[in-house]
Image (cartoon, helix red, strand yellow):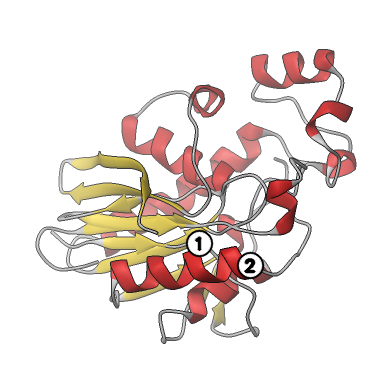
Amino acid sequence: PTRVRARAPRPAAHAGRVAPSPPRACARTAPAEAMLAASPDFQTQLGYELPDAGKANLATASKANAQARLQGRIDLPLDDVGERQADAIAAALGTPDVLITSPLLRARQTAERFGMEPVVDERWLEISYGAYEGLPFHEVASETWDQWRGDVDFCPPGGESLATLGARVVAACEELRHQAVDRTVVVISHVSPMKAAVAWALGVDLGISWRTHLDHAAVCRIRMTERGPSLLSFNERLW
């Protein structure tokens, strides 16, 4: 099997090939592995790593994080802390066979740390909070949070539901499942997509996202085998 890694994004120039946009609504060699790393943005981005079978990593960091705001797709660059976290993650994960990144600036900046051309895939974009993007957490009504937590189909005004996010992430993961068989893949994404990837690996409902926590620039590892994925680690801090 092979490993696939995913890392946190960092503000960088538009580099890499662009994969087809997903429908809107809401590898290392032995064994295969996929790694996801959350870029340093506000809400810790989702990241997962699949060692020995398939791995992906993700990392996150930006000033919005410290301000407790719903960053979502607001395209901010990494700050000094995020830059250091991205450097540490790239150094710890090494050079993968395949590098995939979200198109957001903070993710692309993180991808640059790996010194190779990434594949830009919109399916790894952070969830869209629509009208709530940029708002402090406390400005979103408690009733809205209750509805959001209880219904994966809940969609913020002008935003995306967890169900829609899950559909695009699952499609991306199914592709990685095959790539990670004989190669190491690193994915640089965000908190919500990373949690969706972890839910996919565990074969559980996406509602688990509300019961899990990812730190900024966290990494998760998922092993890819012919029998399917298995979660090796969650919320690793490599910085």
Circle 2 packing at 10 Å, graded few (<14), some (14-19), many (20+), is many
Question: In the image, 98: left or right of 27?
Answer: right
Residue at 62% across / 32% down in the picture?
163
Q: Quadrant of residue 52?
A: bottom left
Drawn side of residue 52 relative to residue 154, left or right: left
Q: From the viewer's side, name the closer residue of 79 and 158.
A: 79
User: At x 28% / y 76%, what residue is drawn?
Assistant: 97
Compared across the picture, whether 59 is left or right of 13 comes to: left
Query: Which is nearer the N-term, disc 1 or disc 2?
Result: 1
Name the residue beneath numbered marker 2: 106
Circles 1 and 2 in contact, beta carbons < 8 Å: yes
Residue 234 on image: x %, y %? 35, 40
Asked which quadrant contains residue 105, the reply is bottom right
Task: Name the residue tied to disc 1.
Answer: 8
**Quadrant of image for the C terminus:** bottom left
Q: Residue at x 19, y 60 (%)?
A: 181
User: Disc 2 marks which amino acid?
Assistant: Arg
Q: Quarter holding the N terminus?
A: bottom left
Q: Is residue 1 above or below residue 164?
A: below
Judged from the image, the secondary structure of the residue bearing numbered disc 2 is helix
Tell me the distance, in whole angstroms, between the alpha carbons under discs 1 and 2.
Answer: 8 Å
**Helix, strand or loop under label 1:** loop
